[in-house]
Image (cartoon, rainbow, N blue to C red):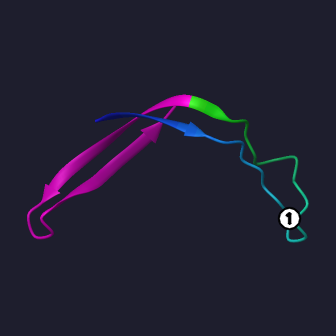
Amino acid sequence: MAIRLDQTQLVVRDASGNPLAEGGSDAFIGLPGSVALNWDQELESWRMTYMAFG
């Protein structure tokens, strides 16, 4: 299954709440992705077995 998502800016903060220069990212609009699903008969539900973005 193909999906698209929007991600707001990601800010990583230290224990004091100050933003760190590393580890964050800009916002992404319309980021393409995919997932794989398997039907779980016991749960009577779809189970996600794989997810990828980018």
7 with respect to 25 (left or right): left
Number of numbered discs overlaid on the protein picture: 1
Please report the residue visible at 85 percent of the width from the left and 64 percent of the height from the top: 14
- Amino acid under disc 1: Asp
* Residue drawn at (10%, 70%) of the image: 42
Q: Is residue 13 left or right of residue 41?
A: right
Quadrant of the frame with the N terminus: top left
Residue that lies at the very extreme toward the left in this rendered image: 41
Q: Is residue 45 magenta?
A: yes
Which is nearer the eye, 30 or 52? 30
Please tell me how crowded label 1 is: few (under 14), some (14-19), or many (20+) other residues with Cα within 10 Å. Answer: few
Residue 10 vertical position relative to residue 40 in the rendered view, above or below: above
Judging depth in this view, the residue of 27 and 14 nearest the camera is 27
Residue at point 56%, 37% (across, down): 6
Q: Quadrant of residue 25?
A: top right
Magenta stretch, residue numbers = 30-54
Left or right of residue 38, residue 30 in this image: right
Residue beneath disc 1: 14
Whole-percent x, y for residue 5 in the image: 49, 37
Magenta stretch: includes residue 35: yes
Q: Main secondary structure of the magenta part?
A: strand
Looking at the rendered structure, the secondary structure element under dot 1 is: loop
Instruction: Tell me residue 9's x, y (percent).
Output: 72, 42
Residue 53 lies, in percent from the top left, at 48, 36
For the point 63% across and 32% down, the residue is 28
Position of 21 compared to 11: left or right? Answer: right
